[in-house]
């Protein structure tokens, strides 16, 4: 479940996105004076309106935002901001300079997770404590990668809100707080729109004080995403499509960690022992009865000497 840990744009976006927000809009004179990285950033072409992503999903860019496609967005996120590669990366939503969204949100990364179909019963039974433990384990690897490149590392991660699954639109909402050092933190809100093959992930990055705004913004983003026929959640074919493999361990570990499941396991164990003993007793009784039936009947003889 690699994209379930998608938070790769948080490190530099706080500083770089604002510093470069107006580049390319103040004439060629300033463009000529820019350095190589600034020129690359200023050369980006943003899109608005309806955009078709590389996987066929149609995105209606919300008002106050602009879209950077996969090629340019990957250059921005990986080359300029120094973040690890995300194979499922599809693009980046950035607030327009001077818009109201710019003060609330740094950006929304759009990616595709092809980890397999997650059924509704599995989604309802996910143990989010176990999920966080697995994300923290992944975070150790991520921090090693960042340390080798001299980048900031995440010292702590925890749920900013209790995770929730919405059955009405088949979405998972995962809001995480990422601690950067002792005094800095950033909010990471991932909206997972479940699909036939996995999930379309929209990961928003914002200041820690924007939690309420993200709670209103991210559910509304579902209306801006239009999955083509064949990729929708209801298009799942159990005979040909792959189920999500990562949920098996999360569900199994979650059940073992919950008190009610532990009690149920103990109860089932004692029930098994009792039933086994009753079966053994039944077999012993049946064998005893069978042997009694096969024993020859003893004839009573009259001793004639008594006459």
Image: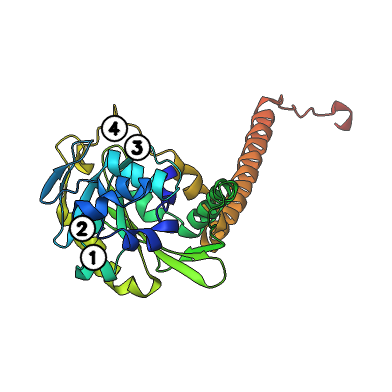
- Residue position for label 1: 217
Residue 263: x percent and y percent? 57, 60
Q: Is residue 110 visible?
A: no
- Residue position for label 3: 114
Residue farthest to the left, as pictured: 49
Residue in the picture at 18% in, 34% down: 230
**Spatial separation of the CA atoms under disc 1 and disc 2:** 6 Å
Q: Judging from the image, what secondary structure is the residue with disc 2 in? A: helix
The nearer-to-camera label among 3 and 1 is 1
Residue 238 is labelled as: 4
Residue in the picture at 19% in, 49% down: 46
Q: Judging from the image, what secondary structure is the residue with disc 4 in? A: loop
**Spatial separation of the CA atoms under disc 3 and disc 1:** 25 Å
Tell me, yes or no, whether the two marked residues, 4 and 1, touch with CB atoms within 8 Å: no
Q: Quadrant of the C terminus?
A: top right
Q: Earlier in the sequence, mark 3 or mark 4?
A: 3
Q: Nearer the viewer, residue 242 or 302?
A: 242
Residue 205: x percent and y percent? 35, 61
Residue in the picture at 36% in, 51% down: 123
- Residue position for label 2: 221
Q: Judging from the image, what secondary structure is the residue with disc 1 in? A: helix
The nearer-to-camera label among 3 and 2 is 2
Q: Residues within 10 Å of mark 3 (few under 14, many from 20)?
A: some
Q: Earlier in the sequence, mark 3 or mark 1?
A: 3
Q: Earlier in the sequence, mark 4 or mark 2?
A: 2
Q: Nearer the viewer, residue 97 or 184?
A: 97
Tell me, yes or no, whether the two marked residues, 3 and 1, touch with CB atoms within 8 Å: no
Residue 125: x percent and y percent? 40, 54
Tell me, yes or no, whether the two marked residues, 1 and 2, touch with CB atoms within 8 Å: yes
């Amino acid at each position: 479940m690699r994209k379930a840990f998608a938070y790769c744009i948080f490190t530099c976006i706080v500083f770089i996105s604002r510093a470069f927000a107006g580049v390319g809009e103040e004439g060629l004179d300033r463009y000529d004076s820019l350095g190589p990285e600034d020129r690359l950033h200023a050369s980006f072409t943003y899109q608005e309106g309806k955009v078709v992503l590389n996987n066929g999903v149609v995105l209606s860019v919300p008002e106050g935002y602009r879209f950077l496609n996969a090629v340019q967005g990957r250059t921005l996120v990986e080359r300029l901001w120094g973040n690890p590669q995300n194979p499922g990366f599809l693009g980046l939503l950035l607030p327009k300079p001077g818009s109201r969204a710019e003060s609330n949100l740094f950006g929304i990364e759009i990616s595709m997770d092809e980890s397999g179909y997650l059924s509704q019963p599995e989604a309802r039974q996910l143990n989010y404590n176990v999920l966080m433990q697995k994300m923290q384990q992944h975070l150790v690897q991520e921090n090693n990668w960042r340390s080798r490149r001299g980048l900031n590392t995440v010292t702590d991660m925890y749920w900013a809100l209790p995770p929730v699954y919405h059955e009405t639109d088949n979405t998972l909402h995962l809001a995480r707080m990422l601690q950067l050092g002792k005094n800095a933190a950033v909010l990471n809100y991932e909206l997972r729109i479940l699909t036939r093959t996995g999930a379309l992930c929209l990961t928003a990055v914002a200041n820690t004080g924007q939690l309420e705004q993200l709670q209103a913004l991210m559910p509304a983003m579902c209306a801006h995403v239009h999955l083509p026929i064949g990729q929708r959640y209801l298009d799942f074919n159990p005979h040909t499509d792959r189920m999500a493999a990562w949920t098996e361990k999360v569900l199994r570990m979650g059940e073992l960690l919950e008190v009610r499941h532990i009690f149920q396991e103990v109860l089932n164990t004692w029930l098994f022992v009792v039933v086994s003993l009753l079966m053994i007793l039944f077999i012993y009784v049946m064998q005893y009865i069978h042997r009694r039936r096969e024993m020859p009947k003893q004839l009573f003889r009259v001793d004639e000497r008594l006459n």
